[in-house]
Amino acid sequence: MSRVQEFPALRERLKPQCEEIIAQYEVSRSALLPLIHLFQQHEGYASPEAMRAVSEMLNLSLAVVESTVSFYTLFFRKPVGKYVLQVCRGLACAIDGADDIMAYFREKLGIGHLQTTDDGVFSYEEVECLAACDRATCMQVNLEFVYDLTPQMIDEMIAAMRAGTYPVAAMAQTEKPPKTWTLRQDMEVSQGAKSAGALDQPAPNNAGGLDKDGIIMLDRILAEEWRFKGRTKERLATEEPAIADIFENGATH
């Protein structure tokens, strides 16, 4: 049975935990992150089914859940390896030989940044400062720190993971991971297209790059600024005093 077919049973099994998490918050939306973490813990990534389930539990649009998940780098929207290896490339680590360590990892694993090995065991990422500068060069393995890296340590680490004897537990893996866990959708959204959860949102104020007429949100504001009178002036462009006046004076058409 596939992961998708098994998801309803997983959702039902996790229902008591989900209800317990939601009950901890005065505003149910605050449970969004821990609920996604819970599903990712059991599936190995934040699956489309999990995001839809959380949106239904919290009475949120799928677009809101998707946009939140996509913001945080520790939520994976595609399956990843059993061991996510995140090597620090911050300044302290770079000074202490991070470039050589990262090159050694790439050579030993045969993959590059944001890629997963063909056997699905390792996902590799080069990350910004992990705040362990006194123990450079450092990394995280499934979020557990490893310090003072050397090539010998890397060899021993990889061997232990392949043998199943490494002290850090492997992540859940309910689906074979692809070569990379990045999404083409990210580029499409940055260019104005809507994410899947925003496709059914017709109003330009809702999440999504384009409104129902195919007009980018910013263009809608500039063309029909009177529609947005009374809203915050926090992001108004100073080079457009006429727009600021409309917001300030509440002019109508």
Image (cartoon, rainbow, N blue to C red):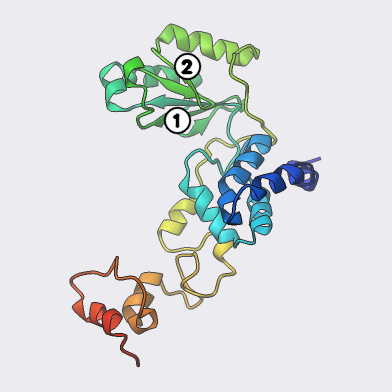
- Front: mark 1 or 2: 1
- Residue 165 higher or lower than 195, as above or below: above
The answer to whether 205 appears left or right of 59 in the picture is left
Q: Nearer the viewer, residue 20 or 12?
A: 20
Q: Position of residue 39 (x, y in %)?
A: 66, 41
Tag 2's secondary structure? helix
Residue type of the residue flagged with mark 1: Glu
Q: Residues within 10 Å of mark 2 (few under 14, many from 20)?
A: few
The residue at 58%/55% (across/down) is 29
CA neighbours of label 1 inside 10 A, class few (<14), some (14 to 19), many (20+): many
For the residues labelled 1 and 2, the Cα–Cα distance comes to 14 Å
Q: Quadrant of residue 99?
A: top left
Viewer can see residue 46: no
Left or right for 120, reference 94 = right
Indicate the amino acid at tag 2. Lys
Task: Answer with the quarter of the image where residue 66 lies.
Answer: bottom right
Determine which residue is flagged by label 1: 125
**Picture coordinates of residue 196 (x, y %)?**
57, 60
Q: Is residue 244 above or below residue 8?
A: below
Q: Which image quarter holds the N terminus?
A: top right
Q: Residue at x 66, y 49 (%)?
A: 23
The percent coordinates of residue 166 (x first, y second) are 59, 13
In what quadrant of the picture does the C terminus appear? bottom left
* Closer to the camera in the image, 234 or 125: 234
Residue hosting label 2: 108
- As drawn, the residue found furthest toward the bottom would be 253
**Which is nearer the eye, 79 or 26?**
26
Q: Is residue 111 left or right of residue 5?
A: left
How far from the left and from the top, in percent, is residue 125? Answer: 45, 30
Q: Nearer the viewer, residue 140 or 6?
A: 140
